[in-house]
Image (cartoon, grey):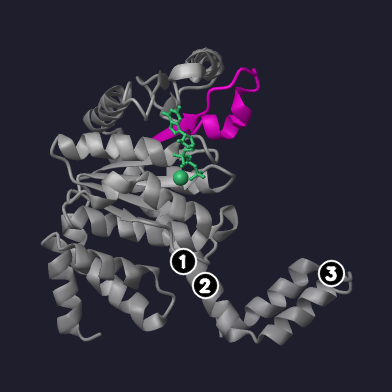
């Protein structure tokens, strides 16, 4: 792509043109060197126009009701005049393509909403790559004028950590359940949450949802608060009836306002930018290392290490020596 084309894409993004935004995100997601260079050039141009959105992470186990909630939540936000972008972070191992099809039908209204933009996760990539590209896609959405960016991830392991690292407010969805196992939520994940929302608080499940909320409140009470001056709340929602959806936004907005007012948001984002820099350096070095070292040579060294012939540290030093030169 020539400089003029790069400028045209960047202009389109800044004008809020959906096709330009989709094209820029495709560049960001590409693994081709020339595409990555073009993506970097576009990002460089639009960077001054980024930073003003409320960045929300939404996570929860499969089937908890993420898509249904985002449909209700996103629609209520666009009705209030906001422009809402939804990005998904899902390492390919986490789910099959079938669920993405499910998402399309569960977010039907939002998908057709002219004030919303939904982008599924790029397929066939590992978590590190997806997280990196999602950060860039998030910046592009901000430059395109979206004032709320939602990053969705299915909570099956490391992806929550990656998402918590790129948003301002992290919302954890939990299922109604009679048990006292806290729906299998790991303590480490609960510690990431700025807000916990129990879903499906309606009909037959209303009672179980209330019990779950009470259990979660007790568990959260025992955790160290994530920020000074903000206690992690547990709310109840029914995405199908709409009950509680507005309260989730009020809580998110209150947390965001508190972080902004206290200077903690600036510190949070600065820390995230620094971590992102080192992520890029790490993956850039690894890519160069792999380009410099033929696969067969690395395989042979791996085999020697695995059989105990060579100590891992010694083998690594030998391979790394060549990177210095
Ligand atoms: N009763 C009730 N059911 C709901 C509600 N929200 C979602 N569900 C149902 O729960 C099921 C899962 O909802 P999804 O929104 O697809 O859940 P998800 O978390 O996106 O699932 P994955 O994408 O597979 O991880 C569906 O059958 C929904 O109809 C709700 O508020 N009330
Ligand atoms: Mg879903």
Residue 211: x %, y % from top left? 54, 13
Q: Is residue 127 visible?
A: no
What numbered label is drawn on residue 281? 1
Q: Is residue 167 visible?
A: yes
- The answer to whether residue 322 is left or right of residue 40 is right
Of the pair 124 and 277, the residue shown nearer to us: 124
Residue behind mark 3:
306
Left or right, 256 with reference to 311? left
The local secondary structure at tag 2 comes to: helix
Q: Quadrant of the C terminus?
A: bottom right
Query: At 26% from the left edge and 33% from the top edge, which residue is drawn?
Result: 263
The quarter holding residue 141 reads: bottom left
Q: Position of residue 162 (x, y in %)?
A: 48, 49
Residue 224 colored magenta? Answer: no
- In the image, taking residue 31 as reference, residue 81 lies left or right, namely left
Q: Which mark is residue 285?
A: 2
Q: Nearer the viewer, mark 3 or mark 1?
A: 3
Circle 2 packing at 10 Å, graded few (<14), some (14-19), many (20+), is few
Q: CA distance from mark 2 to mark 1?
A: 6 Å
Is residue 104 positioned above or below 297 on the image?
Answer: above
Which of pointers 3 and 1 lies earlier in the amino acid sequence? 1
Asked if labels 1 and 2 touch by Cβ distance under 8 angstroms, the answer is yes
Residue 171 is a magenta residue: yes
Read off the magenta span.
168-192
């Amino acid at each position: 792509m020539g400089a003029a084309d790069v400028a045209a894409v960047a202009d389109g993004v800044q004008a809020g043109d959906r096709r330009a935004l989709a094209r820029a995100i495709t560049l960001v997601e590409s693994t081709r060197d020339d595409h990555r260079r073009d993506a970097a050039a576009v990002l460089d141009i639009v960077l001054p126009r980024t930073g003003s959105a409320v960045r929300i992470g939404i996570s929860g186990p499969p089937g908890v009701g993420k898509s249904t909630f985002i449909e209700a939540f996103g629609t209520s936000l666009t009705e209030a005049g906001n422009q809402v972008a939804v990005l998904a972070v899902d390492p390919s191992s986490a789910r099959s393509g079938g669920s993405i099809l499910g998402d399309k039908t569960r977010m039907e209204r939002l998908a057709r909403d002219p004030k919303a933009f939904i982008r599924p996760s790029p397929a066939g990539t590992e978590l590190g790559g997806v997280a990196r590209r999602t950060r860039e896609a998030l910046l592009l959405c901000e430059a395109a004028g979206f004032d709320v960016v939602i990053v969705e991830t299915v909570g099956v392991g490391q992806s929550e950590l990656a998402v918590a690292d790129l948003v301002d407010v992290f919302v954890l969805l939990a299922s109604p359940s009679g048990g006292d196992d806290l729906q299998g939520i790991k303590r480490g994940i609960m510690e990431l949450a700025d807000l916990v929302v129990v879903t499906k608080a309606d009909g037959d499940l209303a009672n179980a949802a209330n019990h779950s909320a009470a259990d979660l409140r007790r568990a959260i009470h025992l955790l160290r608060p994530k920020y000074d001056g903000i206690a992690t709340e547990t709310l109840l929602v029914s995405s199908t009836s709409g009950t509680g959806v507005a309260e989730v936004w009020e809580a998110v907005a209150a947390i965001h306002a508190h972080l902004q007012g206290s200077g903690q948001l600036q510190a949070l984002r600065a820390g995230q930018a620094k971590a992102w820099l080192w992520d890029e350096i790490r993956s850039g070095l690894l890519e160069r290392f792999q380009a410099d070292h033929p696969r067969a040579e690395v395989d042979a060294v791996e085999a020697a290490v695995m059989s105990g012939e060579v100590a891992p540290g010694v083998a690594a030093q030998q391979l790394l020596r060549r990177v210095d030169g």
